[in-house]
Amino acid sequence: MTVPNSGTGPLHTRICELFGVKYPIVQTGMGYVSDARLTAATTKAGGLGIIAGAMLTYDELVSAIDYVKDRTDQPFGVNLRANQDDIDRRIKLLIRSGVKIASFALAPNQALIGRLKDAGLVVVPSIGARRHAEKVAAWGVDAVVVQGGEGGGHTGAVPTSLLLPQVVDAVDIPVIAAGGYFDGRGLVSALAYGADGIAMGTRFMLTSDSPVSQAVKDVYLSKSVNDTVVTLEIDGVPQRVLRAGTIDQLESSHGPTRMLRAARNAVAFQRLSGTPWSKLIREGLEMRKSHELGWRQVVMAANAPMLYRSALLDGRTDIGVMATGQVVGLIDDIPSSAELVERIMQDAEAVLARLTPAPELDSRVLSTENVKGTTN
């Protein structure tokens, strides 16, 4: 079976036109995972690759964008954090570099959305509730990624199967479904709900193009759908992660011990990133204000990057934290991004063919019904 190449048919959706991509498949901007190599591989495969720019320094982001542009002329995106101290400089970089899509894990404000759109960028925030989708749609975003509770990292309590139809019915812009997707059946089911495509994080992390080491990937592959937990103990906001590494310690430790560990990790991250303390403090104040966090949550949020980096980049699964969707329990191989995208599209075509009766069968059914009608 060949994957369709034309710009028609049920698998060519509004996001294919909006993003300028071949297939309605998005690789999300996962911190420490969605690097330039993975983004370039996904983009070349016909999906939308997104660089996880929020965890990169400005210079690292420049290099990552150049890397992708050197390897493909297809559109790709960059994930940003709206409250970053140098967000204005990063936006100018995207505009200057010709990046087409700006994605956000937490929605930017209306003024920032307007600036991006005035510059010709497509703005795509991720949301976890119907009211959030309605709000950002009214502010003028071009599409939304809707992540249900099955998804990895920061997540809500409503499953995708319930959240997705709510959002589709509430907004007129393209909706991209996330949380629980890994194959062509999922793509077709999302389209049946009214979505325009799917976004995947865990599935793309478990590809050969991902920067995560094979040893860490093997830990993921060993887990079932019941081996994840939603915890508040990383940054004070619910996150779905693997039940592995330091999670049990975090959840069982008491306040003073937890805060001391968080503070130490925050200091380590500051040294590693070279980010001035004044900038980290400003970002913390902005986070506290915009997301209504307490000081304990702000300190824990500063701790989170080191926990993720330890596991995903350094391979320290014993002390780090590994974000994941529940779909991890359904994944059992490590294909390339190209193989994964092709497989999903082929599977989706097969599902659609199975659900669509052949014309000759329709004729036979009609003939039989006509015969039955004349004999009654």
Image (spheres, rainbow, N blue to C red):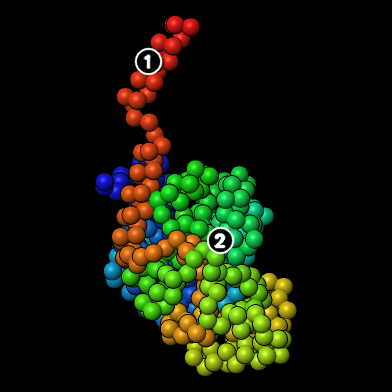
Label 1 neighbourhood size at 10 Å, few (<14), some (14-19), many (20+)? few
Q: Position of residue 106 (x, y in %)?
A: 59, 67
Task: Out of 198 and 61, give the one closest to the viewer.
Answer: 198
Residue underneath mark 1:
367
Secondary structure of the residue carrying tag 2 is loop
Residue 201 spot, x, y in % from top left: 46, 65
Q: Amino acid at mark 2?
A: Glu
Q: Across the whole image, how many numbered discs are drawn on residues?
A: 2
In the displayed structure, 328 sits above or below 3; it is below
Please report the residue visible at 46 percent of the width from the left and 85 percent of the height from the top.
316
Q: Which mark is residue 257?
A: none
Q: Which of the two residues, 49 or 347, is positioned nearer the viewer here?
A: 347
- Identify the residue at image location x=45%, y=61%: 330
Q: In the image, is 340 to the left or to the right of 189?
A: left
Would residue 116 be seen by someone viewing this image from the given angle?
no
Residue at the spot 39% in from the left edge and 43% down from the top edge: 351
Q: Reading the chain from its start, which is encountered first: label 2 or label 1?
A: 2
Q: Provide the secondary structure element on which disc 1 rests.
A: helix
Q: Quadrant of residue 40?
A: bottom left
Residue 322 seen from this side: yes
Q: How far apart are labels 2 and 1 at the CA level?
A: 46 Å
Q: Position of residue 374 (x, y in %)?
A: 44, 6
Residue 248 lies, with reference to residue 26, above or below; the image says: below
In terms of depth relative to the viewer, which is nearer, 65 or 227? 227
- The residue at the point 62 percent across, 65 percent down is 109
Q: Which residue is mark 2?
A: 150
Q: Marks 1 and 2: in contact by CB < 8 Å?
A: no
* Amino acid type, callout 1: Ser
Residue sitting at the far left: 2
Q: Position of residue 116 (x, y in %)?
A: 52, 63
Left or right: where does residue 271 sit relative to residue 132? left
